[in-house]
Image (cartoon, rainbow, N blue to C red):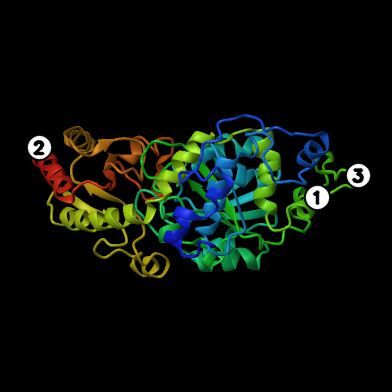
Amino acid sequence: MEAQRFDTAKIHAGYNPAEHNWAISVPIYQTVAFELDNINRGLELFSFNSSDSLYTRVTNPTTEILEKRIVKMHPGATGAVAVASGMAAVSYSLLNVTGGSGRILASPRLYGGSFDSFEQIFKEYGVQVDLVPDPDDIKAYEEAIKEDTKCIYIESVSNPNATVLDIEKIAQVAHQYGIPLIVDNTLATPYLINPFEFGADVVVYSATKGLTGHGNVMAGIVVENGKFNWNKDKYPQFFKTPYFLNDLDGTPRSFLDLFVDIPFTGRIRAVYLNYMGAALSPFNAYLALIGIETLSERLNKQLDNTKKIISFLESRDEVAWVKHPWAQGSPYKKLAEKYAPKGAAAILSFGLKGDLDTVHRLLDSVKIFSLQANIGDARSLIINPAQTTHGELTPEDLQAADIDTQTIRLSIGLEDVKDLIEDLKQAFEQL
Ligand SMILES: *Cc1c(COP(=O)(O)O)cnc(C)c1O
C-alpha cells in the first residue's frame, strides 16, 4: 500500500521489506560498489539508463530509501538527493542553479555558514550574491532582482529569532521574473511547513538538525517538485549534452532529456555529488531514517515546551525581549499562523539585560541546557549567536540578521519542561 499521510510516510514510505529479505528495519548497505553481473547491465548502469545502485558516492539503496521517504513527506515533490551535510545541500543547490555565473538574491536572515559561503566560495565560482535589504518587504525583492539574477534563496523560518518569511509572495515575485525560489526549510522541517505548497521550486535541508533530531548525524537533502522550466537561455547548464550523458548508442542527451521530472536533483547527483563527492554514508542515511520516524512526535513536545519557556522568559526581569512568533507582540504571528499553524520552530531567542559579561555568566550557569553550536537536538541547547554561530558576520550583517551581542538562542529539546524552566531560573538567580 502507498503511504499517503505524513505520519505514515515518515515510517513506511520508500521501503518494501519484501525487497530486502523481509527486514523490518531498513538495512545498512555498507558497501562501496555493486556487482554489475554482466557487461550489458554494467553499461546500462554507467549510462544512467538504470537507477540501480552502482557506486555509493552517487547511489546507495539505504540512502535511496531516505530520499524516497523525504519525497513522500513533501506532497508535490518529485525527487530528492541526499548529501553528507546541510552545507553540501546548500552549496550544491546554489552552484547548480547558477552554473558558474550570475547572481543569487538572498535573504540576509540566513544560517551563518550559508552567509559566509557567499563571500568565501561563490565569488571564486563567478557568482555574486545580493542581499535583500528587508526580507519582510516583498517590493524589496522585486527591486533587487537584476538581469542575471538566477534564483531567490531564503530560509522559511530563520535562526535565531524564528522569523517566518512570506514564502508564497516571494515565490510569486520569483516566478514573475522567471527564476526559481530555493527555500532552506531546516528549522521548520516538512512537518511544520511544506514550502512546495506555497510555490517553492527547490527545498534544502540540513537534516543534521530537527529533521533527524538526535544530534548524532550529519546529513543534507535537496528536494524538488520538477515544475520549474529550466529550458531557457539563463540556465544553459541544464540543456548542455555532456559526453557522460550519452545514450548507449552515442545519442547526446541533456540533463532535461535524461532527468525529466527531476532535472534539478538529477543534475546535482550526476555532477556535484559525482565529482565533488560529499556523499552521505549509508550508516548516516540509516540514522536519519530512524530519527525521522519520530519527527512529528518530537516536534509536538518540543513546541509545547517552547510555548511554556516563552511564557517563563516573558515573566523575568532579566529578560529584555523574547523573539518567536508566539512571543508577545511578535510581528510574525500572522505569517506563522498561515505557514506554520502547528508552530514555526522549537527555537527562540531572547535579549539578556546587562552586558557581554552577563551573557557569559548565564551561559556558564545553566546545567541542563547544553552550550553548543547546534539546533534541533533532543537535548535543549543554548548559545550566544553574535560571538559564535554568526561570529563572522560584520556588525552591519548582524544588524540585518537581527542579532545583537545580548541575543541568546535556545533550541528546545524533549526534557521535562519544569526542569528546563528551573534550570534557567537558577541561572538567572546567579546573575
Ligand atoms: C545547520 C544549518 C545548515 C548547515 O547544515 P550542516 O548539516 O551543519 O552542514 C544550513 N542551513 C541551516 C538553516 C542550518 O541550521
To which residue does mark 3 refer?
Answer: 249
Cβ at disc 2 under 8 Å from ligand 1: no
Q: Residue at x 14, y 45 (%)?
A: 419
To which residue does mark 2 refer?
Answer: 430
Crowdedness of circle 3 by 10 Å Cα count: few (<14), some, many (20+)?
few
Residue 289 horizontal/vertical position (percent): 46, 45
User: Of helix, strand and loop, which one carries label 3?
Assistant: loop
Q: Measured along the vertical axis of the image, is residue 311 above or below residue 217?
A: below
Cβ at disc 1 under 8 Å from ligand 1: no
- Tell me which label, 2 or 1, sits earlier in the chain: 1
Distance between the alpha carbons at the discs numbered 2 and 3: 75 Å
Q: Is residue 323 left or right of residue 52?
A: left
Residue 412 horizontal/vertical position (percent): 28, 48
- Tell me which label, 3 or 1, sits earlier in the chain: 3
Where is residue 281, by image quadrant?
Answer: top right
Distance between the alpha carbons at the discs numbered 2 and 1: 64 Å
**Marks 3 and 1 in Cβ contact (< 8 Å):** no
Query: Which disc number belongs to residue 204?
Result: none
Query: Which disc number belongs to residue 254?
Result: 1
Q: Residue at x 56, y 35 (%)?
A: 29
Q: Amino acid at mark 1?
A: Ser
Q: Amino acid at mark 3?
A: Asp
User: Of helix, strand and loop, which one carries label 1?
Assistant: loop
Q: Amino acid at mark 2?
A: Gln
Where is residue 151, by image quadrant?
Answer: bottom right
